[in-house]
Amino acid sequence: MTSPPPPYGTPRGSALPDAGRDLPGTGLLHIVVAGGGIAGLTAALALHTAGFDRVTVVESVRESRPVGTGLNLMPNAVRELDALGLLPRLEAGALRTGELRYYHRSGGLISREPRGLGAGYRWPQLSVHRAHLQAVLAAAVRERLGAAALVTGVRVTGVETLPDGRPRIQLEHRDDARRGRASLEPDVLVGADGIRSTVRAALNPAEGSPPWNGMLIWRGVSRMPARAVGSFMFIAGDDRQKAVVYPMSRPSGGAVLVNWALARPADTSSDGARGAYEVREEYLGDWNRSVPVETFLHHYEGWEFDGVSVPDVLRAAPAAHEYPMVDREPLDRWSHGRTTLIGDAAHAMYPIGSNGATQSIVDARALAHALARHRDPAEALAAYERDRRPATTALQLANRRLGPEVVINLAHERAPEGFTDIHEVIPAEELASITARYAATGAFDPATVNEGSPYEAGAAFGRTLGAPR
């Protein structure tokens, strides 16, 4: 694995670039990344590593705050972050995921699988708080590309494709202290602005809102005694509702951070008090709508798996967030001229199989690799799309079929009251084939991942093509 990167710089605010202003690095290809989340920040770092020095990330949030919950990074994503020199810093605030267990809601163990290094990968699987991951990425962007590379408090409000394929983007400040609008014509635009992407909407104006599947998700982070949590990640439930629980930090003062996520149909309240869920337009894709834990706690009373009590985990949470489970329909095309999409803007999928952030990170490296290998940026974006779109489309569709979590539904369908021996319900060969098939869909099986990154780009061909107009 790589050695740690140089010391990280102190985050500083950045101003909105004036339209046509000659930024540092005159004569180099100017790439604008819309969105300063995991996909956008990783893209900036991957592009810099590939030799592109003029990269500007615009993020609508003015001040980065420690929001969100936890996530799992699969070994294929950790491999790419390691290639960017980020693994030591990332692991300092993360936990290696050693085992994943599936349970039926009755308490019966369906399967247990080693993960990461224990499964034969050269890289670990990591459980990490989203805020820590984003802080590591943002600090690295500022240190390596300069403070001006990350422009906060600014959003992309419009995009058009010029006759030569270059994008023209409209930008505006969002904070109260400073107001302003500008038009910018970079050489390449990367839409990394999430499930409600402005860039995607500009390229697909008739698409509309993300479709909802009728399920609600509740998420949160709890601080728990380490002895009450266990050392494994688990997914439990039946064919109607599920719970995901896992630790994501090393013990500190005898306690660990625990990430949890729950899913249940919106209109199936056992006491009838909730009734039909009112789906407002602004809820679709809003991950930070706060609700009391008591809203859903009663649905999970009595859920305990190998000593880990789901109700105890929920009661320990200081806050909870609720949102409808949405994704995006797969697109037939991501790239238009010199504009393309990555991450959730390209392929938002249901939160199954730990593939949201994972695939965003792989996208970023693939994009930088393609731009480094092609003199024409439009050809590079087309090559990136040929590499990534088929795989992520397959994962989007697989997650709609519940991906590897389908084993829980199968167990409940065949033994709704529980079981003594899971192999009398689901043969071992069938369980293994479900896991292997999903890993093969996303090319994150151990053999493929251990071959090493296919995205070691080297010097960039396109770095001297054009300058911002």
Image: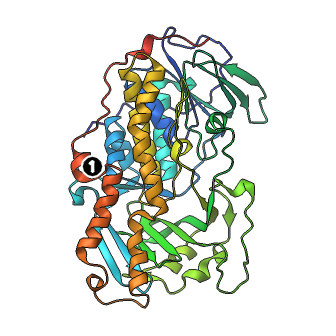
* Vertical comparison of 144 with 376: above or below: below
The residue at 74%/55% (across/down) is: 281
Work out whether residue 121 can be spotted.
yes
For residue 179, what is the image quadrant? Answer: top right
The residue at 39%/87% (across/down) is: 415
x, y (%) of residue 251? 39, 64
x, y (%) of residue 374? 38, 20
* Vertical comparison of 31 with 94: above or below: above
x, y (%) of residue 260? 50, 67
Q: Which residue is the site of mark 1?
A: 123
| Image quarter of the N terminus | top left
* Vertical comparison of 294 with 453: above or below: below
The residue at 34%/59% (across/down) is: 438
**Is 269 or 4 nearer to us in this picture?**
269
**Is 403 or 390 nearer to us in this picture?**
390
Q: Considering the numbered disc 1 on the image, is that residue within a helix, a strand or a loop?
A: loop
| Image quarter of the C terminus | top right
The residue at 31%/23% (across/down) is: 458
**Is 383 or 55 nearer to us in this picture?**
383
Work out whether residue 252 can be spotted.
no
In the rendered structure, the answer to whether residue 148 lies left or right of residue 184 reads left
* Amino acid under disc 1: Trp
For residue 151, what is the image quadrant? Answer: top right
* Vertical comparison of 113 with 4: above or below: below
Give the color scheme: rainbow, by chain, secondary structure or one colour: rainbow
In the rendered structure, the answer to whether residue 117 lies left or right of residue 301 reads left
x, y (%) of residue 254? 40, 69
